[in-house]
Structure formats: C-alpha cells, structure tokens
Amino acid sequence: INHVVHNGGLYKRPFNEAFEETPMLVAVLTYVGYGVLTLFGYLRDFMRQWKIEKCQNATEREEQKDFVPLYQDFENFYNRNLYMRIRDSWNRPICSVPGAKVDMMERVSHDYNWTFTYTGKVIKDIINMGSYNYLGFAQKAGTCQEAAAKVLSQYGAGVCSTRQEMGNLDKHEELEKLVARFLGVESAMAYGMGFATNSMNIPALVGKGCLILSDELNHASLVLGARLSGATIRIFKHNNMQSLEKLLKDAIVHGQPRTRRPWKKILILVEGIYSMEGSIVRLPEVIALKKKYKSYLYLDEAHSIGALGPSGRGVVEYFGLNPEDVDIMMGTFTKSFGAAGGYIGGKKELIDYLRTYSHSAVYATSMSPPVVEQIITSMKCIMGEDGTTVGKARVQQLAENTRYFRRRLKEMGFIIYGNEDSPVVPLMLYMPAKIGAFGREMLKRNIGVVVVGFPATPIIESRARFCLSAAHTKEMLDTALKEINEVGDLLQLKYSRHRLVPLLDRPFDETTYEETED
Amino acid sequence: MDIKRVKDYIYWLYFQYLLITCSYVLEPWEQSMFHTITVTVFAMVVYTAYVFVPIHVRLAFEFFSQMFGGQPDSAV
C-alpha cells in the first residue's frame, strides 16, 4: 500500500515508499520449489558420498575426513546444490566499458555449470541494466577520459606508498577540497576502496563502551566495520523510526548492560539508498531523533551521492536538510562518478583525526592518479564548474528515467520494491527456478540484468535488480520494458494485486496513487 | 494456426509447471525421475478419487437426507 507521509512538517516533499506483501500462493509455491531442490540436493550429496557420482566441489582430503567437517553447513549445501545449477547468471565476463550498452563474452558449460568454456564469440550491444552507472560517467571517450589520460601520462598509474608515507599527491589534496565543497562540509578525506572506507574507519571512530545502532539491511562493509570496532551493536528494523527511538530510549535510560554507566558514544549507521530494497532512509526523522537523544549519525551515501537531489548532492539535498547535521558523511566514487574509492566528509577535527588514526590511511595504498582525475572531472561536471550544463542534464535525465521506468513496471503489474525516486529498481521473482530463467531469458533478448538470490536477500524474496542510468535513452528503456513485459508474461511474474490505472492525459503528480483498483 | 496456438499454450503450461516445481534447473535424469514420481502420485490421486469419492458422496447424501428428511416420515 502506498502511503504518503507528512510527519509533523519534517518532510518538504511526499515520501512514497512501498513494499508489497508476498502473495500467499506465491510464498507457498516458493517453499515447494525449495523443498524439491533440497530433496534433490540430499540425493546428490548421498550419491557423491557413496562415490556413485564424481564429486566436483571442494571436499576435505582423505586424511582429514575424521576432523570437524568443513562443508556440511547450510551455506555449503546451498552452494553445491542450488547456486551451482544457476551459476551462469553471475560472474559473466564483459569485454567493453560498462556504459549503457556492453559487450559480453559468450560462454557455455557442458557439465551443468561446474566448468565454463568460452566459445570465442562476443555478444555485442547488450543493454546494460546492471551496472551502477547512475550518471553515465563510465565512458571511454569524453572530457573525463581525456583528462584521466593526460594525468596518466604525467603521474603514471602506481603510487607505491600509503597516504601517510610518500603517497600523498597534490591530486589527492585537490580532490579532497573539491569533495568538501561538493558536499557542503568543512573537510573530506578520500580512500582507495569504498568497502575499506567503511570497514577501516568505523573502528577508528568507536570502540568498546560505545553503542552502534545499525539498520537491519545495512551493507556488509558497515556490518564488518561495526564488528571490528568492538562496540555493542543493536539492530533496528529497516527504516523504522519507532524501533530506532525505542532503542535510543533504552540506551539512554539503561546505559551499558552490566555496569549501567552511560554509553561513551551512540552512533547510528544508516545508508542513503539501500541497494537491495531500493528504499531511501527517512533522514529528517533520523536527524530529529539524533538531536533529541544527542547521538552521532554516520550516513553511507554509496548509492545516493550523485543520484538523488536536484543537483546530485545526495540524500541530504533531496530532503532539503543541512549537511552539517550529519556528523559523518561517507560515500563512494564507484557508483555515480565512474571511478573507484570512497570518501568521508565532516568537521575538520574529525577528518584530521581520521588522517592519523584510520587504518586505511596508515596501511592502504592511496588512490591511483588517473582515477583521482576521473573523479575530479566528473564532480566538476556535475557541479557545473566545467562551463557546460552536461552535469545538470544528466541528473535530470536520471530522475526522469527513474520515474518513467518505475511507473511503467508498476503498470505492467510487477511487484517493485522501494521508493519512487530511487534509481535502484528491485523486481520480485520469488521462485528459485525463475531466478535462473529470468537471467537467461533476458540475455537471449540482449539485455543484461543482475538477479539476486539467497545470501544477499531473504530466502523467499529473490529479485532482479535494475540500476538505471542517465546514459539510458528513452528508446533503450522502451526496448528493455518491452522485453521485460514479454519475459514477465512468459514466466508469470506479474504478481501484483494493485493495478495502477494508466494515466491518460494528465501530467504525473502524486495524487494518482489514489487511483488503484484491486 | 489454432493447433499451433493450442500447442504453444500447452507448452507454456508445461514450462510453468517446470518453473514452479523447480525442475527447470535440474539435470535431465533428475527431471525424468521427478516427472515419474509426480505422474505416479497424480495418477494414484486421480484413481483414488475415481474409486472412492462417488461412494462417499452418495453415503454422505443419504446420511444427511435421513437426518433431515426422515423426521417428517416418523412424525406422521
């Protein structure tokens, strides 16, 4: 059910998020499917154990058979018997720049996905609906590429040192000043890898005696950083502000578990856009709670920087809030800027502290100069400082593509999760056989999609995740939508029971959500 | 043309059966085994229904008609 939230005047624009419930019949049939696959998995394991069939997966050696078994848990069972059967939808090798269209190397498997061989053919011009290329900066020609090539010829590719030793180039300083100006914070620091930014900096900020309140569906890097820090971790339900407030109240009232002393720090970990659900964090409410209970906020804008907001400055600008309210703004350059790496922005004292104490700054190699130049050029393009309006046009094109694509998919009758404005579009598949079938059928029709199954999502809620890009033209989106419609009819994926009435001639506005027919 | 449409529809129904029971991802020999078991179970269900259901329905009908229709007879 779509609900429009106006929460005490905190929201300046309607917040339309929807997670339609799984239809009961579909859930039952999904369990039936998993049951059948589990039975056949046990049968195959039995045959492998009794040497009726050749065992192609990893096992312990003969001498180690009496030790504690390594491969008997559910993860390995799932891997051997379910993942292997549909493995050809993942790790597909591409051989061109991952822009709006991509080339892929064709591969076949003669022993049911245990090994692959390349046929040598290259499938050309596959519409790429899987790359995180939100603003279309993954290009091999253009100003970014020329600037990066120039810097490559000037500085080379390797840095051969960490930031603290001899790896601090003037390019890094320039990048950090630019990032701070882009975000509207006092200072920023850039790291070579986005995952390492989270996992290596949270331990530097919190330690034992601190409390981390982390969202249920946070990314593995945030979870890893929180666990490495040694702080107490409490989980609140996904995007649920009542749950967060209850945890905050309990933390302030009861303090640390045994000694009842007050917590040294309370850190709230949220993400801007959650990539598996397509939902946007309720940032105005989180900031109001943070101020009321005097805790700190760590915002991971990996997917939302560049993709949300009228000028691409992320989820803070999308809600019209003050960037100084967020204590630590983290983001990555991988998604919207077409490069690699991450950054953390905040007050000057915080960043100076991180320069000395962060593991990533002390031990990890700093960013490579051409990558830095790609970020600088793309960021200047988004801000409009290179003299053109290309950046603004791209941000607007992405917003239009998002709205159009989501509306069309909902009209067709698919179940789509997430917020109306997020460029990540998860389409629910549910049944395990449809995961493999969807990936293969879309590839036959020359569209590359990412399908996601068990460890990344709950076991019955497998989905196909589309990532829209400003580089997709309307014709490409129309082609993709036509094929998705066909495949949806072929595989019976149109589970939604809320049919949106297609708009006739009225322009799109928020009140159309009242016109649903069940 | 109609025969082709009917055949396509039947193939589509078979494809849906394969997807729902996840035999789409199984290897051919596993699929044959699964189809054999499914067809056997389904045939047994149909046969049991054919043999037993009419008798049970008739008995239930007689029981209920005795309970309701039998009273006026005995009162008169």
Image (cartoon, grey):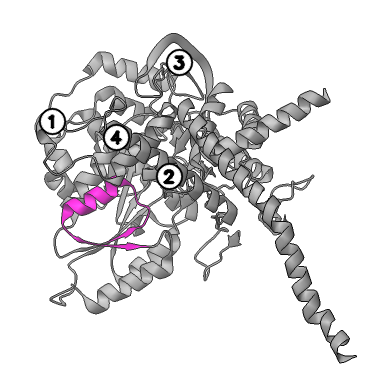
Is residue A17 placed above or below A403 in the rendered structure? below
- Residue that badge 3 annotates: A106
* Mark 4 neighbour density, 10 Å: few (under 14) some (14–19) many (20 or more): many
Name of the residue lying farthest toward the right: B76
- Residue that badge 2 annotates: A275
* Quarter of the image where the C terminus of chain A is located: bottom right
Q: Residue at x 28, y 27 (%)?
A: A55
Which numbered mark, 4 or 1, is in the foreground of this view? Answer: 1
Instruction: Work out whether residue A431 or residue B75 is closer to the camera in this orientation and state it.
Output: B75
Q: Position of residue A18 (x, y in %)?
A: 56, 55
Q: Does residue A20 appear left or right of residue A78 in this picture?
A: right
Badge 1 marks a residue whose secondary structure is: helix
Amino acid carrying label 4: it is: Gly
The chain identifier of the residue carrying mark 4 reads: A
Badge 4 marks a residue whose secondary structure is: loop
- Both marks 1 and 2 on one chain: yes
In reply to whether residue A190 is colored magenta, the answer given is no
Q: Which residues are magenta?
A: A213-236
Rounded to the nearest angstrom, the CA distance separating label 3 from label 1 is 37 Å
Q: Does residue A91 appear left or right of residue B25 in this picture?
A: left
Rounded to the nearest angstrom, the CA distance separating label 4 from label 1 is 44 Å
